[in-house]
Image: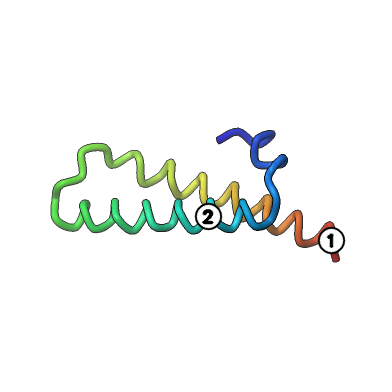
């Protein structure tokens, strides 16, 4: 997801998106532990996407306070 798309989302939407991404990351880590992960680079991409969401969420929180 692009940065401009994240800026358009509300805090509630960002929190839900972050929760979904963390769940995906958890599932991928389980697959990695059982040696069934086909695309290991997806782990890094998910971590970066979570960081983008969290950064935008904290920026929204700073703006409102």
Residue linked to disc 1: 64
Badge 1 local density, few (<14 within 10 Å), some, or many (20+)? few
Residue 21 image offset from top left, x and y in percent: 45, 51
The dot on residue 18 is: 2
Q: Residue at x 23, y 58 (%)?
A: 30
Q: Seen in the image, is 34 located left or right of residue 57?
A: left
Compared with residue 3, is residue 56 higher up or lower down, i.e. above or below? Answer: below
Labels 1 and 2: the sequence-earlier one: 2
The image quarter containing residue 8 is top right
Label 2 SS: helix
Q: Seen in the image, is 38 located left or right of residue 60?
A: left
**Gap between marks 1 and 2 measured at Cα:** 19 Å
Q: Seen in the image, is 33 located left or right of residue 17?
A: left
Compared with residue 37, is residue 60 higher up or lower down, i.e. above or below? Answer: below
Compared with residue 24, is residue 8 higher up or lower down, i.e. above or below? Answer: above
- Furthest-left residue in view? 35
- How was this image coloured? rainbow
The image quarter containing residue 29 is bottom left
Q: Quadrant of the C terminus?
A: bottom right
Residue 33 image offset from top left, x and y in percent: 19, 57
Q: Residue at x 14, y 56 (%)?
A: 34
Residue 57 image offset from top left, x and y in percent: 67, 55
């Amino acid at each position: 997801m692009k940065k401009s798309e994240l800026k358009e989302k509300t805090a509630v939407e960002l929190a839900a998106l972050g929760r979904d991404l963390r769940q995906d990351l958890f599932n991928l880590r389980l697959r990695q532990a059982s040696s069934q992960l086909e695309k290991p680079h997806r782990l890094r991409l998910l971590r970066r996407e979570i960081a983008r969401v969290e950064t935008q969420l904290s920026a929204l929180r700073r703006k409102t306070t």
